[in-house]
Image: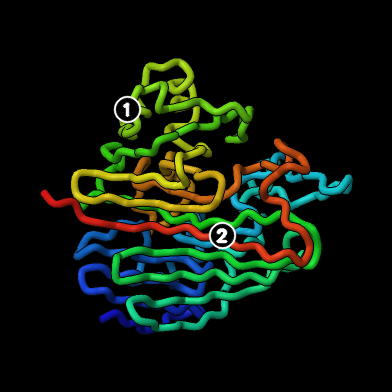
Amino acid sequence: MMFAKVESQSNGIDLIKIDNEETKIVFTNYGARIVSWKYDDNNIVLGNVVEADEFYESNPYNFGATVGRYGGRIANATFELDSKKYELDANNGVHNIHGGPNGIDKRFFDYKIEEQVGQVKVIFTTTIQSADDHFPGDIDLEVIHTYNVDHKWTIEYKAKSTEKTLFNPMNHVYFNLNRDNNVIDNHSISSSKLDMYLLGEDNIVKSMEPLSLVNTFQEQNIQFKDIFDSEDAIVKEQMQRFGGIDHPFDIGGNEMTVENKHFILKVNTDMPNIVIYTFNDTTGWNSDFNIYKAHSGFTLETQCIPNDINLLGDQAPSILEANEPFYSKTSYKISEKQL
């Protein structure tokens, strides 16, 4: 029997807690984010339930947040759409990242809860205003988190814009499947295709010709540690420059898995890319809450390749036509290995 209950903390933060016997998951209206996902006593995502009201508003790492209207960087905080140039807020050096300083990760969403047979839905809603982020168009947005009896968390995005614009939403959840929360170097990623886009300066994709990790490592199941420690010249240069992975990937068949010796996490998505970030720099938060060291977690951000508008022009997948409905769906399913 699944059920949801709401706990209100200070500062307007509500926690929506869903219990599914051996697994429990928690969402919040602040950033329409995931806060906790426990399998028995093992929390497989990074977050803070107890002091969420103090933890999240100052956390610079977007833990568990819905990110938008544009996930990732837009180079030099500028782009052209239909021959018109748009100037965005530069909040990552000279670049725009995650929709800018007024991104939806810092927003309180309205929400409603629907308890259904075998699942619970939390439907978060907001409007992204052009005046807030300097992208064209206002967007009405629904972010629907569903959790079901099969321990599967699904995110659906529904949106419509008043003008032709860019829209590239994603969730910035950090996973760690280790029972002891040790670094994630022992996790393996697998898919029939693991094509990694190489990064130039400032973590910006420099070429639309990715590197096949399946061919490089001659296998479809590759441990993070082997990527970090690779002697392949290209991989080694990228790992040394960025301290780990912070790269967009093409995957095979819209699905991939990440596993350690205890758990398997299966990801399915209809978005064209997944950005994997292995939390390479954890020093940017001067807080007692910052207990994290490098490689404490990894993201699986299902989205369009960051900066696609400047890489691909009018062919960029993130372009959303005026009054055309946007829909996307990603699911994460956790299962315990039978030892």
- Please tell me which residue is depicted at 23% across the width and 51% down the height of the picture: 263
Q: Are the residues at dot 2 and dot 1 in contact (C-beta closer than 8 Å)?
A: no
- Please tell me which residue is depicted at 46% across the width and 69% down the height of the picture: 145
Mark 2–mark 1 Cα distance, whole angstroms, equals: 32 Å
Tell me if residue 133 comes above or below residue 17 in the rendering: above
Q: Is residue 252 visible?
A: yes
Mark 2 or 1 closer to N-term? 1
Q: How many marks?
A: 2
> Is 27 in front, or is 326?
326
At label 1, which amino acid type do we have? Answer: Asp
- Please tell me which residue is depicted at 63% across the width and 27% down the height of the picture: 207
Q: Which residue is mark 2?
A: 328
Q: Quadrant of the N terminus?
A: bottom left
Q: Is residue 131 visible?
A: no
Q: Which mark is residue 216?
A: none
> Is 162 in front, or is 118?
118
Q: Which residue is mark 1?
A: 226
Please, which residue is most extreme toward the left here? 339
Please, which residue is most extreme toward the right here? 83
